[in-house]
Amino acid sequence: MALPLPPAALVHALLAHLLVSSSISLADAKVPAIIVFGDSSVDSGNNNRISTILKSNFEPYGRDFYGGRPTGRFSNGRIPPDFISEAFGIKDSVPAYLDPAYKISDFATGVCFASAGSGYDNSTSDVLNVIPLWKELEYYNEYQGRLRHYLGKAKANAVLSEALYIVSLGTNDFLENYYSFPPGARQNQFSIKQYKDFLVGVASNFIRELHALGARKISFTGLPPMGCLPLERATYFMGGGKCNEEYNWVARDFNGKLRVAVGKLNKELHGLKMVLSDPFDLFLQIINRPSSYGFEVAERACCATGFIEMSYLCNRGNPFTCTDASKFVFWDSFHPTEKTSKIISDYLLKHVLFPAFS
Ligand SMILES: *[C@@H]1O[C@H](CO)[C@@H](O)[C@H](O)[C@H]1NC(C)=O
């Protein structure tokens, strides 16, 4: 961050600045804003403002972010929506809606409603007392009103329909809820197949509501190979440190079901252009062959011992935290490093998001 900007980046930054400082070009841009729903994979700090133990607004979180600032992102640096916003020439990070440091003028070019620990299933957000998906949508509704007041109705509606919506969640429904120990109510109510179908149904209804509110360009994000998250390896007692292949299979199969749902919704909903951003295969490749991507460690995380710590257990008091997170695929036991997020975002931008939306 201390390096002088190379000329190309300077021009880019200048263009991005021009774009956001003129509200006329704002509505004319291909993608004038990034609007985010989901869990910790995309939360940029909403959990800082609610009473949950699932937070990350303290060191060493954010130590590679601008100014070394812990923002509430579950990462050492930026997360995928930040890279996507930058790639579309908008701005280098997407602010959290509940962060009082930002105003509607900031949110007009991008806003995040995501909450770490949330899920498609209402009962998932109850586990750690975080913002449920329906409540994220309520905040979005409120945001629409504020945006219309700020930009005027016509311009605001143009931004809302041209914006790119990122929807990224689902991991917690399985790992925090369905497979929790001791087994929760969902395991008695649903087989794993039924639970996947239930979640896809909730996800599809969420998209219908978002579409009814004016969203047109939407990216569903698929699940990562969640059986290889360091926490899942460490707590998979039969596995001896290996990935939990059942969880990986569930994630892959769930992504297949999401893909089918995307096809159906595109036919069903007028004017909708929706894609699936599926990180599974690339993410698994990175975990299996870390050195091909410039990493040294994939089975444990950078923070603390790297096996189980995240949120308050990943703190500056821990002497084991690694010094160079760019050698690690995972930052804490549940979340990728900035470098991993960048590699996966670049791939999805090139192969899915740019072809569809630029
Ligand atoms: C989740 O809760 C909200 C608010 O109470 C409710 O409107 C919605 O129907 C619930 N969703 C499901 C799938 O039960």
Image (cartoon, rainbow, N blue to C red):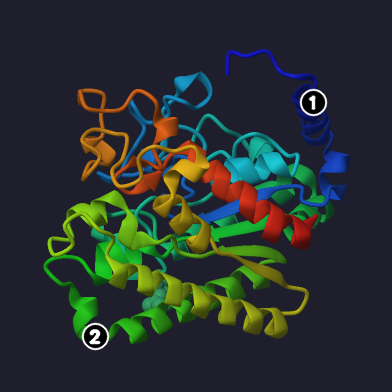
Tell me, for residue 8, which label it has, or none: 1
Q: Residue 299 at x, y = what percent?
A: 30, 47
Question: Could you say whether the residue bearing mark 2 is in a helix, strand or loop?
Answer: helix
Return the residue nearer the eye: 157 or 189.
189
Tell me, for residue 279, which label it has, or none: none
Q: Is residue 256 above or below residue 129?
A: below
Query: Of the residues shown, which amino acid type is indicated by label 1?
Result: Ala
Q: Is residue 135 above or below residue 21?
A: below
Quadrant containing the C terminus is: bottom right
Counting the numbered discs, the total is 2
Q: Residue 131 at x, y = what percent?
A: 39, 55
Taking the spot 34% from the left edge, 81% from the top edge, the residue there is 195
Taking the spot 71% from the left edge, 42% from the top edge, the residue there is 87
Q: Residue 278 at x, y = what percent?
A: 55, 64
Taking the spot 26% from the left edge, 72% from the top edge, the residue there is 178
Taking the spot 35% from the left edge, 85% from the top edge, the residue there is 193
Query: Of the residues shown, which amino acid type is indicated by label 2?
Result: Gln
User: 243 left or right of 217?
Assistant: left
Q: Which quadrant of the figure has residue 9? A: top right
Q: Residue 12 at x, y = what percent?
A: 79, 30
Quadrant containing the N terminus is: top right
Residue 79 shows up from this direction: no
Tell me, for residue 189, which label it has, or none: 2
Q: Quadrant of ligand 1?
A: bottom left
Q: Is residue 145 above or below residue 324?
A: below
Rate crowding at label 1 as few (under 14), some (14 to 19) or many (20 or more) other CA atoms within 10 Å.
Answer: few
**Mark 2 touching mark 1, by CB under 8 A?**
no
The CA distance from mark 2 to mark 1 is: 55 Å
Q: Is residue 155 above or below residue 60?
A: below
Q: Which quadrant of the figure has residue 59? A: top left
Which is more N-terminal, label 1 or label 2?
1
